[in-house]
Image: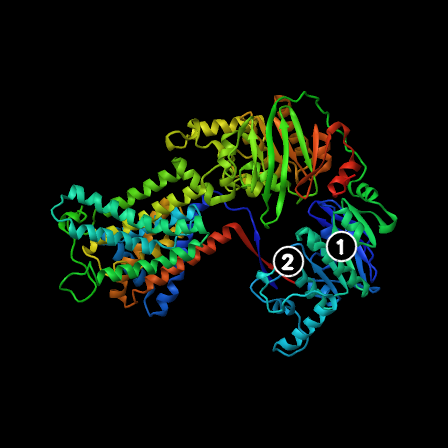
Amino acid sequence: MRGITKRFLDTTANDHVDFELYPGEICALLGENGAGKTTLMNILFGYYSFDEGEILIDGKPALFASPRDAIALGIGMIHQHFTLVPTQSVLENIIIGVSESANPFLNLRAARERLLELQDRFGLHVDPDALVWTLSVGQQQKVEILKALYRNSKILIMDEPTAVLAPSETPELFRTLRMLADEGRAIIFISHKLYEVMEISNRVMVLRNGKVEGGRETRDTSTRELANMMVGREVLERIEQVETEPGDVVLRIDGLTAVSNKGLEAVKSLSMNVREREIVGVAGVSGNGQSELCEVLFGMRSPTSGTVTLSGKPMRLGVPGEAVKRGIARIPEDRIETGLLMDLSVEENLILENHAAPEYGGRGLVRKTAIAEHAEELINTYSIKTDGRTAAAKSLSGGNLQKIILARELSSDPKLVVASQPTRGLDIGAMEYIHGRIIEEKKRGAGVLLVSDDLDEVMNLSDRIIVLYEGRIMGEVRGADANREQIGLWMSGVQQ
Amino acid sequence: MRIQLTKRQPLPTWSRIAIPVGAIVTTLILAAIPILAAGGNLWKSYYALFYGALGTRFNILETFVKSSPLMFTGLAVAFAFRAKFWNIGAEGQLLAGAIVATWIGVYAVGVPSIILLPTIMIGGFLAGGSWAVVPALLKTRLKVDDVVSTLLLNFVMAHIMGALLFGPLQKPDASWPISEQIVEAARYPILLAKSRFHLGIPLAFLAVLVVWFINTKTVFGFRAKAVGVNIKAAHFGGINTTSVIIKTALISGGLAGLAGVGEVAAIQYHLLSDISPGYGYTGIVIAMLGNLHPVGVMFSAIFFSIINVGSQTMSRMTGVPSYISGVMEGMALIVMLVFLLMNEYKIRVVRK
């Protein structure tokens, strides 16, 4: 791949990326969230078109209109979310989309023999007649690999293959990958777990902000160097930090364990606390338990064990109403799906949480005037740009949508603010405004738990930084003493 | 060449009225095709249609009589759909209301009207309501799809009614499925002389007002709207979404039940297996045509009953079969859905 550039609306996801892959090697593609790894691979697999550059396969230019063309040229991709039909058998899944001849009838017997032969050769044993939904995630991954092999893929793209596996299943996957590479196939291994990359790959390519940060032979590099390349060295202008003396503990989390939607333990007996006048930043590569932790605090997820104490009193978990009642300001990571009712008006969104309070909804009736006054006031205070308080939320820009949430959550002077990815997808102006508000809250006396994938944000705002890795606290450091390298290593699961 | 749908800025507020009106006009124009195909003279047929529905005092009042059950089932569906409780079961809920009204009405001999009328209304409301709460519980507790469960429960209720009409509710000397007549005191009073204009008609208009009030003025109405717009965000905001869905189902089913009460207490005076010619299903179309707004439901129910009543006259005067009303109802729904789609999307023809 030469000079690949891909632009989405106003962002450049890949900026003149050069990428080479040789037969028989395992090349790791490393980078933070949003670095452009998945975009690049989707281009290689024919999912996305690209704006500039060219792709050469075996020296010949290749143009893909769809994944079908990529598959025909021997490229196979195993997505993080499998693309299997759960109600069909393993064999049926494997032959989907493969047309070997003009014969309209399925030759299941021949297909089965070929599959069994592949299974023997690579030790990927899965019952061909088992229905896919009955298989474990690890076995489903084997089916995906078999599917790619069945189609004679010479290049295998594995998008974070270990993210869905239990730790004990990883070595088996690695054995398979090595065997495939020894046969002369080329494997692209996308990950941000450094020790895995060090263990499995021959070569590492690091992407950062859509550009190639560098390439290294695995044996010539170290986790430390890779972590540096991944998180970068440039330091953005540091927000003027306000030193405050933290007060009493506002939020205490004890032994919290929570299971993700996939059924894996996402948060593992986590204990931490947040004090008054303190911003605690939670850093980590996304998918290491941050979302689940926030959901528990929001009342949106019931933990399997552990307790949460708010200002000394235990909190009832799994009930969003409790979080509202106890006055936690909650800024969810997904403002459109979770935070707001996009088809309702600005004023209705602003009173969502206290619509039943006596002044807005006393005796079961909606008090229009009070709601309107409340809305006008907040629109002014938070300078929300809207066509009016009755405009539908969906007519507002992302930054202004986030301001609606801030206005709703912060106007009641909360003791605790839990902000999850508060500036994700926002422009610099909105970002600065939100950072300013968060510091305001701290000065006022609130404790703030700031969860963000944006390491700059966490480092700039936090008095204390906690790094989550696979649901556990990998490291903790005072904001003033934090250095990117150390945090980068913790984020990648490397403990010194 | 390909045809593509692309999102566009929806039309402003006036479109909420313009769209249904436009849909009705378009339907009347399109209906010319089947009318001509049936050999009818176009102007004569339309004249007969509107004369039959609105030409005389009696015809107008008959149109109102027909609109009452349609308004109730239309409101039932619209109220449920607003909270995204997909109640396709107004038909079964109507039957539940009719059964309970009959049961009370047949056996409550000697009870004065002033007590009996409210009793059968409340009984019918609760019967329809609880029949709708069943799928609401299945939805909230077990995540059973409400479209399927509400639809299938219609057939369950139809068979329950059949069993009752051949069993305990059957008129002793009858050989077909029909109940005894309900007592005089249980019958809705006729309000205008020389007509069938009964108590159920002003009640339907009252129901329009009540639903409008709940939707726009009450905290519950706000919650139901929030649940309908985005149940996850409503839950996040502290709303007990389960309770909202169950209460919505109770009110929705109750309104459909009242349609059934009206058919027994004001029209038939007894229960029979074809007590409803599919009012519950027509209610879905009416709710959609009325844009799920109670006032819209009121007008579209009246429009449907105009077509329904008028097509009888048209059939007698021009020989165009009265089934044309069913064709027009179907057309109205399709046209309305297309118009609603066009409000949010525009068609683009892409040349390759």
- Tag 2's secondary structure? loop
Residue at screen point 84% across, 45% down: A222
> Callout 2: residue from which chain?
A
Taking depth in this image into account, of A193 and B61 the one nearest to the observer is A193
Position of residue B112 in the picture relative to residue A472 (left or right): left
- Give coordinates of residue B258: x percent, y percent: 27, 49
Position of residue B80 in the picture relative to residue B264 (left or right): right
Can the viewer see residue A107?
no
Q: Are marks 1 and 2 in contact (CB under 8 Å)?
A: no
**Label tally:** 2
- The amino acid on which the numbered mark 2 sits, given as a three-letter code, is Phe
Q: Is residue B295 above or below residue B4?
A: above
User: The N terminus of chain A appears in which quarter of the rendering?
Assistant: bottom right
Per the rendering, the mark at residue A189 is 1
- Give coordinates of residue A139: x percent, y percent: 65, 60
> Callout 1: residue from which chain?
A
- The first of marks 1 and 2 along the sequence is 2
- The amino acid on which the numbered mark 1 sits, given as a three-letter code, is Phe
- Tag 1's secondary structure? strand
- Give coordinates of residue A357: x percent, y percent: 44, 29
Residue at screen point 41% across, 45% down: B245
Q: Is residue B303 above or below residue B220?
A: below
Query: Disc 2 marks which residue?
Result: A82
Query: Dot 2 surroundings within 10 Å: few (below 14), some, or many (20 or more)?
Result: some
